[in-house]
Image: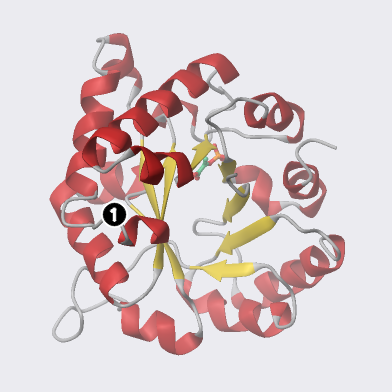
Amino acid sequence: MREPFIAGNWKMNMTPSQGAVFAASLKDALKGSRTKVMVAVPFVTIPAVLEVLKGSNIIVGAQNMSDQKSGAHTGEISALMLKDLGVNTVILGHSERRAIYGESDSFINRKVLLAIAEGMEVVLCIGETLSEREGGHLEEVLTSQVTEGLKGVSAEEMKKITLAYEPVWAIGTGRTATPEDANDAHAFIRGLVAKLYNEGVAEELIIQYGGSVKADNVAALLSKEHIDGALVGGASLSVEQFLPIVNFGA
Ligand code: PEP
C-alpha cells in the first residue's frame, strides 16, 4: 500500500517573513491531517518556516542543492548545510532547473547520489516537453531521465526516492494531463522501474503527478491506480487552494 504524498513547491516565492506567516496558517489548516505533506521552500526561507512548523507533521524540503559536497562553488548550497538546518528532503531535476539552468540528467544524477549518500530523501522530477510528446518521444524521454537520473541508486536506496512525473507543458500553464494520460505515463514509469530494479521496488515507489494540479482535478488524478500524490506549484501558494488538494479534492 503506497502512502499518498502531496508536496508544494513554492519556487522563488515567499520571503522569510511571508513564509512564516503562510506556514502558520497552513499549520493551522492542516491540523489533524494524516496525509504526508511537504512544502519545498526557498533556501533563505527555510529557517523561518521550520521554526513555525515545529511540532507539525508538515515536512520542510528544499527545491535544489549542489552536486558538490563543499568548497569553491560560489552561490551553491550543500546537502550538509540543508541537513544542518534540519532539512532531509530535496526536490531535484525540476523542469525549470533543466530548462532554464541547463541541468542535464548526469548532473542531476550526481545530486541524487550525493543526497542519498547524505541520508536525504529525494523527489526526482521527470517529464517531457510538448514537442517531445507530440513527436512521439514520451517513452524515450522518460526512459532516459529515469535511467540516467537513478544511475547508481541501489534497490534499497530506492526507498528514499519519490518520482514526480511533471509534463513540462502542464506546469504553470493551467493545462493538465488527463487522468488517463497521466496514469499511462505513471504506469510506464513504474514498469521501467520494475525492469531496472524489481517488481517490489516498483510497487512501493511513490510517483507524484505535477502540472497545474488544483482542487477540482486532484481527486480524478489521485483516483488512478499509478498516481500516488501530487507536486503542486501555483496552488501551493494559497492555503485555500492547497488544503483541498491535501484532502484530495474534499
Ligand atoms: C511545479 O512547479 O512543479 C508545478 C507542477 O507547478 P504548477 O502546479 O503551478 O503547474
The x and y percentages for residue 52 are 72, 81
**Secondary structure type for disc 1:** loop
Residue indicated by mark 1:
155
The x and y percentages for residue 96 are 36, 45
Against 98, residue 52 (above or below) is below
The x and y percentages for residue 17 are 67, 77
Report the side of 215 relative to 103 (left or right).
right
Q: Quadrant of residue 166?
A: top left
In this orientation, which residue lies closer to the viewer: 92 or 2? 2
Q: Residue at x 49, y 27 (%)?
A: 170
Look at the image and tell me whether residue 104 can be seen.
no
Q: Residue at x 50, y 59 (%)?
A: 12
Report the side of 33 relative to 18 (left or right).
right
Q: Quadrant of the N terminus?
A: top right
Against 101, residue 78 (above or below) is below
Q: Quadrant of the C terminus?
A: top right
Q: Residue at x 31, y 38 (%)?
A: 193
Q: Residue at x 17, y 51 (%)?
A: 151
Q: Amino acid at mark 1?
A: Ala
The x and y percentages for residue 244 are 80, 43
